[in-house]
Amino acid sequence: MNQFDTIHRIEHNFAKSNPNYLKDMFGTTDVMPLWIADMDFEIAKPIQEALQKLVTRNVYAYEFNTGDVFKAISDWNLKRHQLKLNPKSFVQVSGVLTGIGVLIRELSDESEGILVQTPVYHQFFKVIESAGRKVVSNKLKVVDGQYQMDFEDIEHKLKKLNIKAILLCNPHNPIGRVWTKEELQKLVHLANEYDVTIISDEIHSDIVYSGSRFNSIASLENNQNHIAVLGSPAKTFGMQSISNGYLYVPNQDTLNLIKHIIGSLYLDHGSIHSANATIAAYTKGEEWLDNLLEYLEKTMYWIENFVQNELPEVTLFKPEGTYQVWLDFSKLNISDAALKHLVVNQAKLALTPGDWFEGLHTQFMRMNVASPLSKIQQAFHQLKKALDEGVNCSYNDEESSNECCSC
Ligand SMILES: Cc1ncc(COP(=O)(O)O)c(C=O)c1O
């Protein structure tokens, strides 16, 4: 049996299965939680061992080893992505979103614009708006069934609006695109021309499937003054809640500015648990990750076949990266409320509603598939059963004033 086939106990304290969260968001606790982007898998042994070593200690003291953490991150990027990073250009932050929040505040003034490519990770809206900046939405286009950047619209907005940064998501959550070198090069060209910074959230960089290649914005030429990169081992190694994030800023002036503000808030070092777990992950976790990617790739293949053969009314955007799948239900031709009822109450699935990622996507849902394949198969069979039955008669669709939609 594959190590990733094991079904582990899901703690009630986990956000994804916390009854209060489920009740709040889905109106019921009787759902399989596949909404939040974390994993149901056992973490790599070297990470467990690093943490176990720490809990058997009798004495703890101030202990800062960000230097070793940055070296581990640099070595990993060189080996994994052929990306040469200067260990001196990193800053530690508690999480990626903290880093984005700080960058936005330092690189722009209140009411200035930050461009995002929608649909996109919902916390981007909060991190921009809570800093008093303006979200400028640049919609991704679907061309031949695949999402693409709309460069014309980006240029138009950079020209007309007071935009200070582009908040890039690469690989892109929720649509799963891994941006190509050509796409990124065009973006860098525009950033240079209009003097805006690309803040590149690369937290999903290690979850990339065969046929695609991850390119960091830091790997492109002629960009060192207009970029900042954010990363973390959280998504790669299932270390949500035990890892910190990091910022990588090649421009020395910007780096000094960021170091100063992060340092003055004493946010520049994590706990020793996070540091040692991160070092263990990046120095000894590669084999585990390769096995994980192989497993996820098989899961994606199964999903693609199932959707194609059994769910013709659902459109799947097969991801090039990330362990999220983006599903379009619009061909069902039912109201938003009926779709929600079908998925939550009939299929008993807690998926992330598409409108979290941009208001218009009410007929989309994101499913997190970093779970044993048997569980994902069960979820899709539940979905198929619900779709085959149609919206059931107990449902009262106020939105379309259609009392009983399918009978
Ligand atoms: C694109 C992206 N950025 C950031 C985060 C969260 O990162 P952190 O918990 O380190 O702030 C997530 C989590 O889902 C994400 O998908």
Image: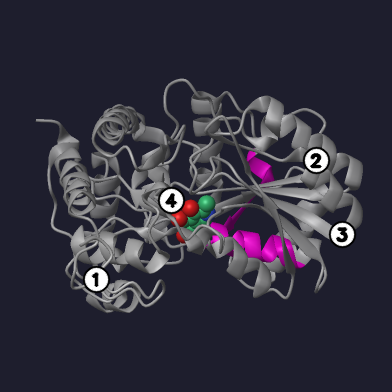
Q: Are marks 4 and 3 in contact (CB under 8 Å)?
A: no
**Tag 3 near tag 2, CB within 8 Å:** no
| Label ID, residue 161 | 3
Check disc 1 and report its element: helix, strand or loop.
loop
Name the mark on residue 13: 1
Q: Earlier in the sequence, mark 2 or mark 1?
A: 1
Q: Residues within 10 Å of mark 4 (few under 14, many from 20)?
A: some
Label 4 or label 3, whichever lies nearer to me, is 4
Magenta-span inclusion, residue 382:
no
Give residue 233's mark. Answer: none
Is residue 123 in view?
yes
Q: Is residue 189 above or below residue 203?
A: above
Which residue, given by chain and number where applicable, does mark 4 sit on? 330
Q: Is residue 91 magenta?
A: yes
Pointer 1 residue Cβ closer than 8 Å to ligand 1: no
Q: Earlier in the sequence, mark 3 or mark 1?
A: 1
Question: Is disc 4 in contact with disc 1, using a CB cutoff of under 8 Å?
Answer: no
Q: CA distance from mark 4 to mark 3?
A: 33 Å
- For marks 4 and 3 on the same chain, the one whose residue lies earlier in the sequence: 3
Residues packed near mark 3 inside 10 Å, few (<14), some (14 to 19) or many (20 plus): some
Identify residue type, mark 3: Leu
Residue type for callout 2: Glu
**Distance between the alpha carbons at the discs numbered 3 and 1:** 44 Å
Q: Which mark is residue 152?
A: 2
Residue 373's quadrant in the figure?
top left
